[in-house]
Image (tube, coloured by chain):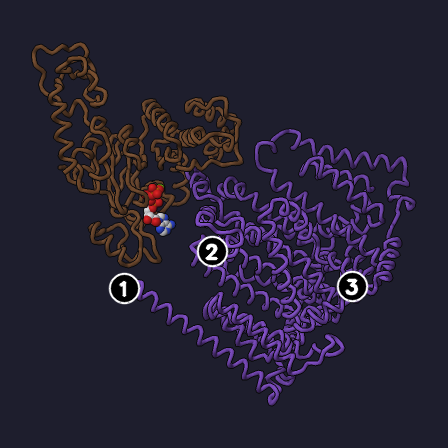
Chain colours: A purple, B brown
Amino acid sequence: MAAVEIAGYKGRTFIAADAVRWGAVFGFAALCFIAGDKHPWLAAYPDSWVVPVADWVNHGMDWFVERFRDGFKMLSALLGMPMHLLQRLLQWLPWPAVLGVFAIVSHRAGGWRLAAFTTGALLYTLLVGYWSEAMNTLALVGVSVPLSVALGFGLGLMGFRWPRFERPLQGMLDLMQTVPAFAYLIPILLLFGFGPVVGLVASIIYAAPPMVKNTMLGLRSVPEELVESGLMSGCSKRQLFWNVEFPAALRQIMVGVNQTTMAALSMVIIAAIIGGFNDIGWEVLMTMRKAQFGQSLLSGLVIVLLAMILDRISWGLAFQDSGPSSRSRRRRYGYPAAALAAVLLSLGIVALIPEIRTAPETWITSPADLLNDWVNFVLREYAAVIEGIKNAVLFYGMMPFRIGLSQSITPFTWGIEMSAEVVAVYLALVGAAAVWCYRRFGWRGIVPVAIFGAVLFYGTTGIPWPAFMAVIALLAFEAGGLSVMALALASMAFILITGLWNEAMLSVYLSGLAVLICCVVGGALGIWAAHSDRVSSILRPINDALQTMPQFALLIPVLMFFQVGELTALIAILIYAIVPAIRYTEHGLRTVPSHVVEAARQVGCTRRQMLWEVKLPLAMPVIMLGLNQTIMYALAMLVIAALVGTRDLGQAIYIALGKADAGMGFVAGLSVALVAIVADRIIQAWSRKRRAALGLAAS
Amino acid sequence: MPTKNSSSISSTGGGVKLACHNLWKVYGPSPEQFFPGRQGGVPEAGPCARDIRAADHIPAVANVSFDVRQGEIFVVMGLSGSGKSTLIRCLSRLIDPTAGGVYLDGDNLLDLDERRLIEVRRHKIGMVFQNFGLLPHLTVLENVAFPLKVQGVTEARRHKRAMEVIELVGLGGRENAFPAELSGGQQQRVGIARSLAVEPELWLLDEPFSALDPLIRRQMQDEFVRLQKLLNKTIVFITHDFLEALKIADRIAIMRDGEIVQIGAPAEIVLKPADQYVAEFTEDVPLTRVIKAADLMESPCADLVPCDGTHPDTTLEDLLPRFAHHETAVAVTDGLGAVVGQVTARSVIRALAENATQRHR
Ligand SMILES: Nc1ncnc2c1ncn2[C@@H]1O[C@H](COP(=O)(O)OP(=O)(O)OP(=O)(O)O)[C@@H](O)[C@H]1O
Ligand SMILES: [Mg+2]
């Protein structure tokens, strides 16, 4: 009895404490809004207060480049050599030889089906006339992947062996994965000069983190008993590693190789932006810039196909290599022999019929113009519809979020004036929502309603920065305590004083809106998939395809119909970032402990109640991790979407890249990374807290 | 009642193979603080373990001492978390003890450097693990030959030797299978074969049969007894199954919270438990499996029929059916057939009744 009372008492004081905190922060925010008119520095951080961090970085970079340029030139030549050799080789080999070797490797990795797929995909590449571009891309990937794998493996091994090394390594990995690719192209560009080597170096660095992570994970999860039995067998350290630990971790390490390959490919394509040397990424980019969507769609498809081939092959090799079947003679000697035979055979054929070496011009049938015509036809015929959709989304969805209802409701957009009545109606609606949430969730339910209501009214860009900072800081504090709050504050301060607040808010607006839609739509799809195996089996391959596709290629179809602009960016982000929302929701719901579900059914829950009262609350920690991933994906795509015209941090980086402005690139890139890391830490902390509260095992 | 100290040092039989003196393993942020001079003057177990717990450290092994004779099966028992695995890992130095000494043939294992430790493991110690610890990417043959491979034995020779032990554990014909293709019992046979491949002198087994089904477990125990008759190794065997211990043990040590609370022959543990903990531990053990003919033997009377005599080591379980056939007394004969005593039905019943009431008090 006493214990219960004490618990109740404690509960009450606790509630009071964080209620007071939220009250204070909201009060402070309101004050900022009111005082904003009189003190413009509250509304917009004055330019004169900006600390020129970017300039400092540029100075430092200049000094560094000046001093080490020769060294990097040499390194560049060194790295360029194998790449040029491989490129020459792939170009010299007649296409049937390359195709044959790929088909044979595919058969080894995935049987006849994969071999057929690979053959078809490469034939497509040949027939639409992108063979030589595809070979150039392959040459880049072919050199960057082994180097990246070696680098990642080495670092992972160090992290595994020396625990002290692990923390800094982890921090570095977080940064490498959140700093947008465009941003670190700049220093590489300055150091290595224009050319394909930039893409190579960038993709080596960009693709290493998954290898590091999987190497460490694999080695660390080797069962203790296996290590002990190795030791008791009398292994020395080295024998233990190569005979026990490495083989046991091989599968996980191969997963790393797979992810590294995919990352390298997507980076090689992104790097085409600066290092264009007639590879497939360059082709996509050029045609996109010239608005030749037919061509860019066809070449984009080549990228997608290449990605799928490499993905399937490396995945297949990863999951076949250990185990009984890999021992047969045929696997050991048959495949290399067949590959060699294919090469020799095609060389022989080419010697006899030289015209075959490069696929004859007459074979190549590019349906690009046909596609262009069709697109133009659709655009013409349905101009009104497309325009209608665009305006509707813009006026009723995007603008309120960006500049707020207070400014976006005009006779021109909504057809009504922003009058006192409208404000009253809006306030009434928000009030009603607040009451409903209060009824359902208690006073904590009011917090998101209040935040959402204010954002919708004033717009993401219309919120005074001190108010925004205060709310985020408190959110961070409630989720993860003082350390997360300190990180959030420091990050926001950095963005503020480097003068990128407005751009950052635009990023927050665009990615926030995308994440919101992803949560609603993706969450609904995930719930549906969790309750229907059919839906699940339909969604899975779509999700897989969207994940393997280089982000770049996603832009093309959207761009075709909606042209350059924020809407295109939003849709592209949506398509890319919705995948984790669906997946994690489904996974979370499907893994709710079955005994809990049974118990709930036993007490007579309806399906609805089961979902809302039992499953969703229990699945929430997992779903939150999905939200986390969705945010990361959205931010990654946001930067790529700068290509289709945005005005946020991504655009700042893209412009910096164009001007080779390392300082700006650094500052803006770091800002994106900080946004990502802060969001990540807050959500992780919250999820951990929920997990502990629900007594679920951490994973 | 024998005290802990008197029975911790073995009194009979061959020379001491493995000895362990005041062994400690403490987990926590700074375990060394409790042991200023590493091997010198280790404090009394009880109070010190309490101090260590009070300082938020875990004494997983606390002041453990025992000797194991050449050819003896020494069984360590205890509840989950009592420190059995930690102890056996200290014996092979998979875990470095915090204090104390482990002597194999008189040499302190804790003094060995990395290279010599590897030598000892390669030639003197074999170990079997609860979850088998087989390398999943190697076949049965390669797994068994693995300890020889790391020693640099040529392929032909190590495969020949591996085949011998594989035959020995009854897995002939499965040598090219992968561990995943075998049942649990078969996998543990592989584990046993591997540990025997190098002909170790000391054989450590950490709950080798716990992961198996009861039926298979019994089969493996019989198998183990058969092997030991053949090989006559010095064995430290961990289990938490008392019946298993009874079946195989020469002596049993009972552990609680890292300390050994009693060491003795199986019958001693059951009939004269050192404290309540041990008594509860052995509560469900049928007395008929513990009490042996030798424990009840009286001097033979004249009209005893000596022919159908029984061995002093026969348990009551096997003896009882004889009394069903109207025998009032059974002769006890030694290995050569000479009568050394007799067991009467009355003495059997008395022993059972006495011990039963004693246990339930
Ligand atoms: N690496 C470690 N760090 C901290 N404590 C440990 C560690 N390993 C074991 N312990 C603790 O030491 C104690 C003894 O563990 P041990 O594994 O030796 O028990 P056990 O008798 O083998 O139990 P089981 O029958 O479950 O195998 C336990 O309380 C355990 O929590
Ligand atoms: Mg154990």
- The tag earlier along the polypeptide, 3 or 2, is 2
Mark 1 residue element: helix
Q: CA distance from mark 3 to mark 2?
A: 51 Å
Query: Would residue B252 appear left or right of A612 to someone viewing this image?
Result: left
Most extreme residue toward the right, as rendered? Answer: A362
Q: Residue at x 23, y 54 (%)?
A: B50
Q: Which sits in the foreground, A694 or A309?
A: A694
Residue B300, placed above or below residue A179: above
Query: Would residue B343 appear left or right of A113 to someone viewing this image?
Result: left
Tell me residue B138's x, y (percent): 52, 33
Residue A385, placed above or below residue B131: below
Q: Give the label on residue A2, or none.
A: 1
Q: Which residue is mark 2?
A: A163
Looking at the figure, which quarter contains the C terminus of chain B? top left
Query: Would residue A409 appear left or right of B267 to someone viewing this image?
Result: right
Q: Amino acid at mark 1?
A: Ala
Q: Kindly identify which chain the residue marked by label 2 belongs to.
A: A
Residue A16, placed above or below residue B127: below
Q: Amino acid at mark 2?
A: Pro
Mark 2 residue element: helix
Q: Amino acid at mark 3?
A: Phe
Looking at the figure, which quarter contains the N terminus of chain B? top left
Most extreme residue toward the left, as rendered? Answer: B302
Q: Residue at x 39, y 41 (%)?
A: B116
For the residues beneath circles 3 and 1, the answer to whether they share a chain is: yes
Q: Which residue is mark 3?
A: A562
Q: Does the rendering let one see residue A336?
A: yes
Q: Residues within 10 Å of mark 3 (few under 14, many from 20)?
A: some
- The tag earlier along the polypeptide, 1 or 2, is 1
Question: Would you identify the image quadrant in which residue A407 lies?
Answer: bottom right
